[in-house]
Amino acid sequence: MFGKRKERGKATIQIADCTGCGNCIEKCRHGVIEFVYFKEGRYARIKDNSRCSGYGKCANVCEYEAIRMVKIMNYEL
Ligand code: SF4
């Protein structure tokens, strides 16, 4: 028997579109996003998606549309 179904959004980052500006990291209060540094610069990636509240503030401040909120289906058992 399935439990009650819930829908939540989770942040995903298209790394190819990220400029590494850091706006999303400043906006996220849950520490979901972190920088990865490489020789030519940096980009943002999801560090811990389980902490994502799904509000999408990070996506709203990304001027390059690198962040998308994706609905993930969860089941409460
Ligand atoms: S706001 Fe967008 S472009 Fe800036 S670091 Fe975050 S994902 Fe990358």
Image (spheres, helix red, strand yellow):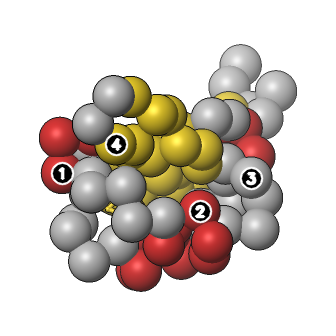
Q: Quadrant of residue 43?
A: top left
46 relative to 65, above or below: above
Callout 4: few (<14), some (14-19), or many (20+) C-alpha neighbours within 10 Å? few
* First along the sequence among labels 3 and 1: 1
Q: Residue furthest front?
A: 39
Q: Is mark 2 within 8 Å of ligand 1?
A: yes
Query: What residue would you read off at disc 1?
Result: 17
Q: Are marks 1 and 4 in contact (CB under 8 Å)?
A: no
| Dot 1 amino acid type | Asp
Q: Are marks 3 and 4 in contact (CB under 8 Å)?
A: no
* Residue 54 screen position, x and y as percent: 59, 62
* First along the sequence among labels 2 and 4: 2
Observer able to see residue 25 = yes
| Dot 4 amino acid type | Gly
Q: CA distance from mark 2 to mark 1?
A: 16 Å
Query: What residue would you read off at disc 4?
Result: 41
